[in-house]
Image (cartoon, rainbow, N blue to C red):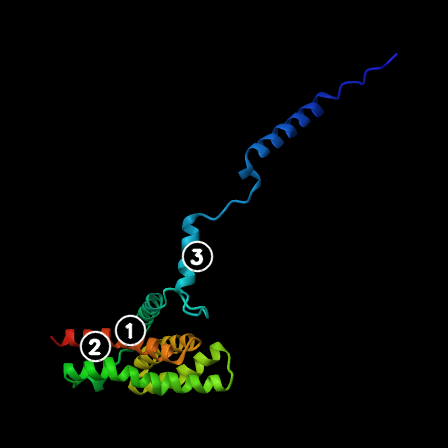
Amino acid sequence: MATLAPDPPRDLRLTAMSSANSSGDNAADPLAVQPSEPSVTAHCMTRLLIALNPFSAKPPKPFLPWMTVRYLVVILAANALLSRLGGHGRPDLAGMTPANLIVLAVFLGPITETFLFQALFCGLARRLRLRFWWQVAVTMLPFATAHFHYGLRTGLQAGVVLGYFLSYVYVIQRRTSFIRAISWTSLFHMLNNGVIIFIILLLRH
């Protein structure tokens, strides 16, 4: 005569039913077993911080707009920090006529300084087979040193901050070609000086 197995205790049956229901819910809802994805806002903020990073060895795209934004963020922060140092800016520019300022400071100066500082010293660093950041440092140092002649504030703003960005632009673009490096660096320098000369001429009137 066959014997019937005793029913499992009520607590065990409830546990089994709860586990089954839980498994069924997870199967029906695949999002319940997947890690949550970052929000669109967080993703955009991350991309923005990467694009604004002035110490990234990877060039941003598009290059000139993002480099300009990076420079503006850094130079505005530097101006805020250095505002208490005082200083008289560039006295050598004070007596120049508007035409001389535009020709010398906006066009001839940036092109000449690109060859004299960035091209010459980056070429030396490349011959020594220095790595990327050493090339930037070697290229920046003479430019920064030359601008400390006009005072501490000018040396830090124009020499160190602008000098870093000009060296960075040159070294990055030199990976592609010499002509490209000269062109982009001179253009970046011209844009910077053009804004400064515009402000100087505006204040004169």
Quarter occupied by the N terminus: top right
Which of marks 1 and 2 precedes in the sequence?
Answer: 1
Number of on-image labels: 3
Q: Is residue 43 above or below residue 172?
A: above
Q: Residue at x 55, y 37 (%)?
A: 30
Which of discs 2 and 1 lies nearer the camera? The answer is 2
Task: Determine the image quadrant of residue 63.
Answer: bottom left
Q: Which residue is mark 2?
A: 197
Q: Which residue is mark 3?
A: 46
Residue type beneath disc 2: Ile
**SS class, disc 2:** helix
Quarter occupied by the C terminus: bottom left
Q: Is residue 95 above or below residue 26?
A: below
Looking at the image, residue 90 sits to the left or right of residue 15; the answer is left
Q: Disc 2 and disc 3: Cα gap in Å?
A: 35 Å
**SS class, disc 1:** helix
Q: Which mark is residue 49?
A: none
Can you give x and y, in whole percent of width and height, for residue 202 in the image?
15, 73
Callout 2 environment at 10 Å: few (<14), some (14 to 19), or many (20+)?
some
Q: Is residue 13 visible?
A: yes
Can you give x and y, in whole percent of width and height, for residue 94 in the image?
18, 84
Q: Which residue is mark 1?
A: 83
Q: For this rendering, which residue is in front, 171 or 195?
A: 171
Can you give x and y, in whole percent of width and height, for residue 11 in the image?
70, 24
Q: For this rendering, which residue is in front, 78 or 165?
A: 165
